[in-house]
Image (tube, rainbow, N blue to C red):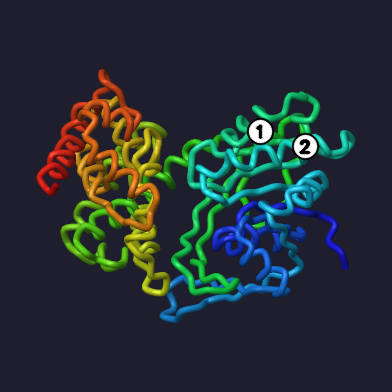
Amino acid sequence: MALSKKAVHFGAGNIGRGFVGQFLHASGYEVVFADVDPDVVQALRRQSSYEVHEVSGQRGTATDHVTTVSGYRSVDNRLEVDDVVRELATADVVTTSVGPRILPSLAATIGRGLAERAADRPPVVIVACETAINASGTLAGFVRQVVDDDDAFSRAVFANCEIDRIVPEQSPGLDVTIESFAEWIIETGPFSGRAAAPEIAGVTWVDDLAPFIDRKLFTVNTAHATAAYYGWARGIGSVRDALAEPAVHAEVLAVLAETKALLVAKYGVDPDEQQAYIEKNLQRISNPHLPDTTGRVGRNPLSKLSRHERLVGPAAQLAERGLPADALVRAVRAALDFNVPDDVESRELQSLLRAGAGDELLTETLTGVFPGHPLFPALVAVIGDKVRSCRVAA
């Protein structure tokens, strides 16, 4: 029997299939995966279902629960754009998991879908499920640039969210191994007076998303990145093994102590509750059944070093409050050593460091922190140190 609700999801990778797609399927949506990888699109067409293997690591077994996802379709977002537009025009929900830097490329297609959407249909709910702050709002800005018609643009509700689920590197195929823990939190504000929030199993709806975004970004992502960069520099292949190294573990605890101080100061978070959250998440990223590599977790270092991201973001806010951020600045220095040739941002980062455009200018370029900010001198010092080491190596 045909499903009465439809969701279009951009990005049929492991997060798309194993997290967002799984949740939408469980909520009764027909999921239409839109992807630019023809192999993935064809695999989804050939295979009528795939399995999501959930792992907690708490029972001593590799898999705690298996969910079968079926009733989906797939379209090629590069070669079948007209088909994607038609799907968007009649979708109830649109979600993404393509990476923040890819969002601009979706704007034109989404804009066309809104233009072709019947005016009497309820607004489509668009949620960008990306590890970036205000991702849906950012996507809305890109779409607004290509949609001149106010009526067409009003046919969508863009709602920001926070997502948290660890998905390690996978074997080939559509099946996904993923941790059993999952958190998907969506803001309610954009729906006020415009549309009803969709029913999505497992989603938590909140009025103020900011504390949840910061808590996750500055705990889970900060810890993950710190362990990856220090571990990679020591030749350690897995994040779990990196955390088992006493020196790396100490640095991870140090950055989390600083981000904890920020969350307490900024939101009045209970210190004991945050400490429990820290310990829980250190267990998650150490899960022996979800081995993740330092190379995968550390990839896209330019994005991770940007102004509002997991290292510079909390460090800047701490400095503004007159609180120490020494461990976070050391983690920034560790990130500068990440040199993985098959990662585009890593190559770009190393190229910028070797070019040595001047320590202050390079600091502005890499971190978005400018002269006059209390964190600026510390960042200039570590970036300058890395530039000098590059010159010595050359």
Q: Which amino acid, mark 1?
A: Val
Q: Which amino acid, mark 2?
A: Leu
The answer to whether one can see residue 112 in this image is: yes
Which residue appears at 62% of the width and 55% of the height? Answer: 36
Q: Is 206 on the left or on the right of 378, as rendered?
A: right
Q: 94 or 113: nearer the eye?
A: 113
Residue 392 percent across, percent down from the top left: 10, 45
Q: Secondary structure at mark 1?
A: helix
Q: 11 or 378: nearer the eye?
A: 11
Q: Secondary structure at mark 2?
A: helix
Q: Is 186 on the left or on the right of 297, as rendered?
A: right
Which residue appears at 52% of the width and 67% of the height? Answer: 180
Residue 318 percent across, percent down from the top left: 29, 32
Q: Against 309, is 378 above or below? A: above
Q: 98 or 127: nearer the eye?
A: 98
Q: Kindly check if marks 1 and 2 are in contact, taking CB atoms under 8 A apart as contact.
A: yes
Q: Which residue is mark 1?
A: 143
User: Circle 1: is it few (<14), some (14-19), or many (20+) Cα within 10 Å?
Assistant: many
Q: Which residue is mark 2?
A: 114
Q: Quadrant of the N terminus?
A: bottom right
Q: Against 274, is 67 above or below? A: below
Residue 69 percent across, percent down from the top left: 68, 70
Q: 309 or 215: nearer the eye?
A: 309
Residue 266 percent across, percent down from the top left: 38, 31
The answer to whether one can see residue 273 in this image is: no
Which residue appears at 23% of the width and 26% of the height? Answer: 360
